[in-house]
Image (tube, rainbow, N blue to C red):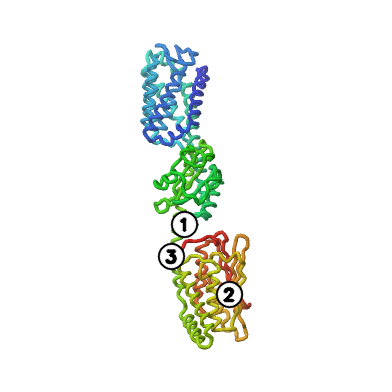
Amino acid sequence: MFYLLPLMLERVGILIIVAFLLSRMTSFRQTLHHEDRLPAKLLLIVIFGVFGMISNYTGVEIHGGAIGSEIWQAGVQVDSALANTRIMGVAIGGLLGGPLVGLGAGLIAGLHRLTLGGYTAAACSISTILAGLVTGWIGRRFRRSDPGAPWRAVAIGILMECVQMGIILLIARPFDAAVQLVSVIALPMIVMNGFGTLMFMLIIQSILQEEERTRALQTNQVLHIADRTLPFCRQGLNPASCREAASVILEATDADAISITDREQVLTHVGAGSDHHVPLHSLATQLTRSVLEQGRMSVATSKEDIQCFHDGCSLQAAIVLPLQVRSGTVGTLKLYYTNPDRLDRVQREMADGLGRLLSPQLELAEAEMQSRLLKDAEVKALQAQVHPHFLFNAINTISALCRTDPDKARELLIQLGVFFRSNLQGARQILIPLSQELRHVEAYLTLEKARFPDKFEMTFDIEPELADLEIPPFTLQPLVENAVRHAFHGLGPHHKGSVCIAASQKGHEVMIVTADNGKGIPVELLEQLGEQAVHSEDGTGTALHNIRKRIAEIYGSEGSFRIESDADTPGTRVVITLPLHLAHRREMHA
């Protein structure tokens, strides 16, 4: 009996080696994850049925209590029996695949054992089929991912071996030979089959855990990429934002190049092939067009599938993902590889997850843009309404000058036209050049200074390269109007007001400062100004609140609006900070 233990361990080792080799095969791993499908079940029947056949062939022949030495059993003598690990493979198959797999594997292994002969052939065949049925039924409730699953499988395997020993005693004849056989093989077969089942189930569990770890890492990586690309996706599909997003994706994945397109052209391409995959060129491949038309991921595994026009292109494989907004495809994300072998299932699943996350970000960006446009239109509609007193005062001033100073009246009429034109243009645009906003300020000041010639003066300190800087309309003119109407009010005839607008670049930011030398603002009022409309004798602060709100909606945390003032100190400074990379970006018209 004890001499049989190392021989059985040797046979179990063969099956464990085969199981380990199977665990390295992608097809076997996929089968384990889809065992509920009929093709997978049929494959599992074949795999574990063959395991049972191998166990039969590598069994140890027992003749009259003597242990044989043959390595391969092509047949068994009439008065001999086999000690093997057949039940182990069938039981594992049933636990993993359920009744159909258990019965199928049991039939294959059991019928094969019947063909080998021996006085226990019928008993072993029946016990094998029964083991498949029982373990298959148990397999319906068997949780493979449970940490205790291998030990439960061991217990079930041992139980099936005990049942087999009982069936041998019931069916095999002569009875004395059956009793002698069981006394020799029972303990070694129970121990070794239990050990083999444990090893096999640990291998299966390691496969499942490895897949779970891989999926968790993929999910974490995709979420990390999505988090880093979110600020750029919120800007929509444009060359600047896509270039930044593509650089992030290239750094975080195994791809050799990343390309992002809209429906008409390539917006960016970073990585390998950048010498001829040039942004802002029209789409050149049918692969991209088919993804745009069908809205489904497509995979190219050869240079011919990519259809690059450049003969020396190093890109040999690609994953093309649709970018969708409201169920419509607005562009594509393409991951290129110089080696097709690197485009494995892990890369495909990660790319698919990335595409599924980026699309909602683009959809959210468009929704935010639409909301911003709506809110901005409401604000502009309010700001485009000129204060009636300002209009009447300007007309009265021009009317009085028509007789005394026609040239001055003509100049004021021109400035009034500029003022109204700026109001109308500002109501139709999200951003305008700084120079245009300054013309709006100058037109307003010209009309006000005609009424109060010596009340205030205006100076500008604008860096020349910032003339084309784009800012929200009605940003500076209301600030200057606040100074004229409120800061200088009640300071006496000898006080000459001064307002200065300065714009300068500080690193990656642009700082626009509007400063006056008028009255300071009390602390309790300063805390509310810009945050909400207030109630006071001098005004409501609606203009400051609108300016702050629009800057926050357009630039997010990258823009800021700050008021610096003190009731005990003359003067107020309003500091607006804008991100340079967005301030120079042309926006669509409302």
Q: CA distance from mark 1 to mark 3?
A: 14 Å
Compare marks 1 and 2 and give the one earlier in the sequence.
1
Label drawn at residue 561 = none
The residue tagged 1 is 365
Q: Which amino acid, mark 1?
A: Ala
Which label sits in the foreground, 2 or 3? Answer: 3
Which label sits in the foreground, 1 or 2? Answer: 1
Tell me the crowding category of disc 3: few under 14, some 14 to 19, or many 20 or more residues within 10 angstroms, Cα based. Answer: few
Compare marks 2 and 3 and give the one earlier in the sequence.
3
Q: Quadrant of residue 120?
A: top left
Q: Does residue 530 appear left or right of residue 378 in this picture? A: right
Q: Does residue 186 appear left or right of residue 250 in this picture? A: left
Q: Assign the C terminus to one quadrant of the image.
A: bottom left
Label drawn at residue 374 = 3
Residue contact at pointers 2 and 3, CB within 8 angstroms? no
Tell me the crowding category of disc 2: few under 14, some 14 to 19, or many 20 or more residues within 10 angstroms, Cα based. Answer: few
Q: Is residue 352 visible?
A: no
Q: Quadrant of residue 449?
A: bottom right
Q: Secondary structure at mark 3?
A: helix
Q: Which amino acid, mark 2?
A: Val
Q: CA distance from mark 1 to mark 2?
A: 37 Å
- The picture places residue 229, in percent across and down from the top left corner, at 52, 52
Q: Is residue 33 visible?
A: yes
User: Residue at the location (45% across, 57% down)?
Assistant: 366
Q: Quadrant of residue 98?
A: top left
Q: Secondary structure at mark 1?
A: helix
Q: CA distance from mark 2 to mark 3?
A: 33 Å
Q: Nearer the viewer, residue 382 or 215?
A: 382
Compare marks 1 and 3 and give the one earlier in the sequence.
1
Label drawn at residue 523 = 2
